[in-house]
Image: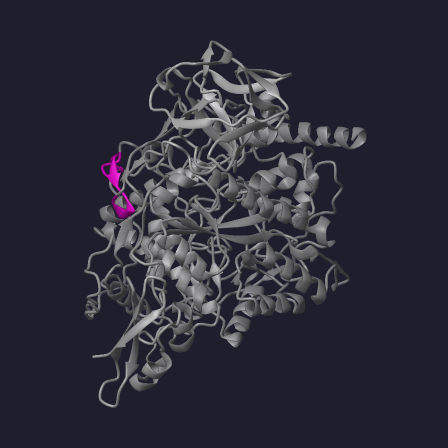
Amino acid sequence: MERKQSMRIGLAAVAAAAVVATAMSVPGGGSGRALDLAAAAEADKSALGVPHEDPPGTPPHRHDDPRTKNLISRAGFEEGTVDPTTAEQRRAAASYVERERALRDPILKPVSVYPEHADVPETRFAMAGACYTLQAPSGAYVVRSGTEVSLAPVAATDAAPFYFKATRLGGYLLHTSDGVLASRNGVVEVVAEPSPAADWTVSRNSVGRFGFRSLAGDALAASGDDLVGGDRVSAYRLRLATDGCAAYPEADIGITGDPYGGTSSFQEVRGYVDAHTHGMAFEFLGGRVHCGRPWHQYGAPYALVDCPDHTLTQGNGAILESFLSGELSHDPVGWPTFKDWPAPESLTHEGTYWRWLERAWRGGQRLFVNLLVENNKLCQLYPLKRNSCDDMDSIRLQARDMYEMQDYIDAQFGGPGQGFYRIVRTPFEARQVINAGKMAVVMGIETSIPFGCTVKIVLGRDQPACDEAEIDANLAEMHTLGVRQMELVNKFDNALSGVAGDEGEVGLFVNSANFLETATFWQMEHCEPADGVSHDKNQTTLPTLPEQDAIFGAIFSLFGGAIALPQLPVYPPPAHCNKRGLTDLGEHLIRSLAERHMIFDPDHMSVKARQSSMDLIEELDYPGVISSHSWSTPDTYPRIYRAGGFITPYAGDSTGFVEKWRRHIEWADPRYYWGIGFGADINGLGAQGSPRGADVPNPVRYPFTGLGGVEVDKQRAGERVWDINVDGVAQYGLYPDWVQDLGMVADAQQGDGDLIRDDMARGTEAYLQMWERATGIAPDSCRNAGLRKPVAKVESVIEPGLTTVQVMRRVGQPFRRLGRWYGVCAKTADDPRVMVNIEFDATGRVIRVQTP
C-alpha cells in the first residue's frame, strides 16, 4: 500500500510538470394457441433478504469495499443502516415476485446466427465472412504464386480462394493466409498489411458479376493474362470456395447453437438487459484516454491495441494506467496476447469490442443501453487529445459512431439491417428486433454539462449558461439523433441539478473540478435522513484510496497540479447532503423528457434534487423512470418501482449483485411486470466483476447451457482464453458467464440459482413494459384491478385489423403475450376478473376476440 501511494505522489508530480510544459509549448413451454393462464401460486413466503453469508470457499474480501461496486447504492448508502420499507411490505413484494415467476414463459424459437452463403452471391454484401474465387470475363481465374497474382485458364478448384473480410457495407479485404490483395501503382499483389490500396469497394452489375475498386482509386482490371490496377473495372464471376481458404484473424465467440427469437414479432420477450454502458468511450475525454475501440475496419488486430503513449514506452510511461492500477508498468500488447488487459479493474482499455458484444447477445442479452458520455473539465485537464472537449460535440460524435458501428456489424452479417446490433427508437420497434433474434440498442446520455447547461454560482445566485429554449432545441436534436434515455448530471453541479458528489480522494479532486466549472465547491451540509441511508457522498479532507469512477480523480490528481485552487472547504460532520437541488431549468427538462416519452434517470443527482424529481414524476404520473447503475439512494428505489419504473443495479461482483437482487425483490411493486437487469458501466467509468477464484467449491463449469439452450464455453481471442472463475468480467463478452455465476452464488446461499437467472431473463421485458407505459399506454388490468373495464366495453373497442399498439392504446398493456395471443382482464357483474383473449395474425393485426 505504501509503495502504491508513494508511486502515485511521484507520478502526480511528474505529470503536473508535464502539463505545465505542454501548456507552454502547445425457453418457455406451452403449446401454440392454447392459452394456459392458470392462476399462479398464492402462498406467501418470507422475504428473500437475509444477512449476507458468502458461499463456501469464497476468497477473503471486504464488504465495505471503498470502491462501492457491491453496495446497494453508490450515491451515499452505508452498510448497517435501516431499510426504508417495512417487513410486511418486503414480504408482500417477495410473495408477488414468486407469483410472477410461476406465469407461463413465452415460446422461443432458434434463428440463424449468420446467413448461409450462396454458391453465387446475390448482392454485393453477401460475400462477407466467406471464401470465393474470382473468374475474369475471359473465363480465366485469378491465381497466385507467392505474392504475385495473375489470370490463368485453370479449373475452379485450382483458383486462388479469397476470404472476404468486410470493412464496411460493400467494402472488403480479400484475405489470404499471408496477406491481403492490394493494388499499388498499378501492380496487383498480395501484401502483408491492410491499407486503402487493399480495401475494395465492390459493385454488382445486372447480370450478377462483380467489379472491384480500391479506396486508393485502382480498379481490379483484367488485361489478357494479367491483373492490373487500372482505371476501368472488370466484371468477375464469384464462386464459393470450400478448400484452402484462411479466415481473417478475429475474436472467437465460444458459444455454439443458434440464438433465439419469438414465435411472433409482438410476443413477450426473454433476455438480459444492461441499461448503463459506454460503448463509444474511446471518443470521450478528448479521445486519447481510452485505449482501443469497439470496432475497426480492419478487425481485432487494429481495434484491440493500446494507446500510442503506452506503446511507445512499452507500457512504462502510461501514467494514468499506472496511477489507477498501482503498477509501474503493463504489457501494452493487446491483440493477440492480451497479457494484462482487458481486466475487471482496467479503466483505460476497451471492454466492448463488437465481437464481445456479439458473444453477450449470443449468450442471451437482448437489450443494451449505450450512454454517450463526456466530462469537459477533465478532458481539458488531460494533456493528450484529438477531439473537442465540449460535452455536446462529443455526444454528437459518439452518436454518429454508434450508427457507423451498426453499419459495420451489418456488413459482417451480409448487408443493411442484417446485424444483431439494432439501434431502436420505440419500445415497439425494440420488441420486433428482439423477437427477430437480435439485440435492441437504446441510445442515452450521461454527461456533466448536457446541452451546455453549466452554471456559475456567484454570491449564492445562479448564472446559468442555458435557458428553456436552448434546452428544448438541444433535446429535440438529441431525440432526432435517437436518444431515448437521459441523466441530468454526472460529476458536477450544473444549471439543472445538484450532484451526489464523490467521497474520499476522488471527492477531493472532483470537488476541485466542480469549482473550476461552477466557481463554487459542493454545498454539502450536515443532514440526518429519516431512513439513515439516503444522503449524498460524505466529504473528507483525508486522502484515501481511489474509489469507484477512479478515473475522474486520477486525471485531476495527475494533470491538475498546474492549476491554482483555493483551499477546499471544511464541511460539518457527516452525513452530508448537497444543498443544491433541482432547479427550475431541471424541472423543465424533466417535463420535456416526459412530453417526448423519453426515459429519465435520476442517478448522480443530489438527494434533494432526486426527491424533487420524483415528486415531479409522481405529479406527472409518468412511469418512464429508471435507476440504471445504483447511483440513486434507497429512499428513491421504492418510489421508482411505485411509479412504474425499472431499476438495473450496478453489476459489480457476482456475490454483491446477488445481495442487491434480494433487496430489490423486496421493493417490487405488484402492479407491474417483474424483472431485473444490470448496469455494467463498463469502459473507463466502472470496474467490473472480480473473479471468485477457480478453487471455490461452486465455480462456473464450462461448457454450460445458456439462455435459449445455447452451449457456452470459454471465450478465446487471439492467444488468450478467458474463464470467469479466474478472470472475472474482463470484457463484455463474459456477461453470460457472469449471469451463470450469479446462479452459482445464489445456489450456494439459498438454493435459488434458477430464480435469479429467471428474473434476469425477464429483465428485458420489464424494461420494454416500462418504456411502453412511458409512451402513454396504461398498465395491465389484471395486476391493476381498478383499470378493468366491462367485458362488453373491451369487446366493443377491439376491432378486426387493429395493430397490437392500437389495441394497447385502447385497453392497456396485456397481462400475457403468448405467441399471437394477448390476454387482458375485464369484469362482469358476476365476475371481477374475466380474461379476454385477443388473437392477431402474423403481421400483428387483430383477427378475433375470445371471452369465456
The type of colouring in the image is one colour
Residue 313 visible to an observer of this rendering: no
Decide whether residue 698 is among the magenta residues. yes
Q: Main secondary structure of the magenta part?
A: loop
The mark tally for this picture is 0
Give the camera-side residue of 202 and 206.
206
Residue 850: quadrant of the picture: bottom left
Q: Which residue is most to the bottom?
A: 829
Which x, y percent locates residue 281?
A: 56, 41
Which stretch appears magenta?
Answer: 696-709
Vertical placement of residue 352 versus 818, above or below:
above
Q: Which residue is most to the right?
A: 24
Residue 479: quadrant of the picture: bottom right
The answer to whether 423 appears left or right of 553 in the picture is left
Which x, y percent locates residue 565?
A: 74, 44
Q: Residue drawn at (74%, 59%), measured in percent from left and top?
A: 465
Give the camera-side residue of 185 and 742.
185
Decide whether residue 608 is among the magenta residues. no
Q: Residue drawn at (66%, 64%), measured in percent from left and top?
A: 472
The answer to whether 358 appears left or right of 261 in the picture is right
The answer to whether 481 appears left or right of 58 in the picture is right
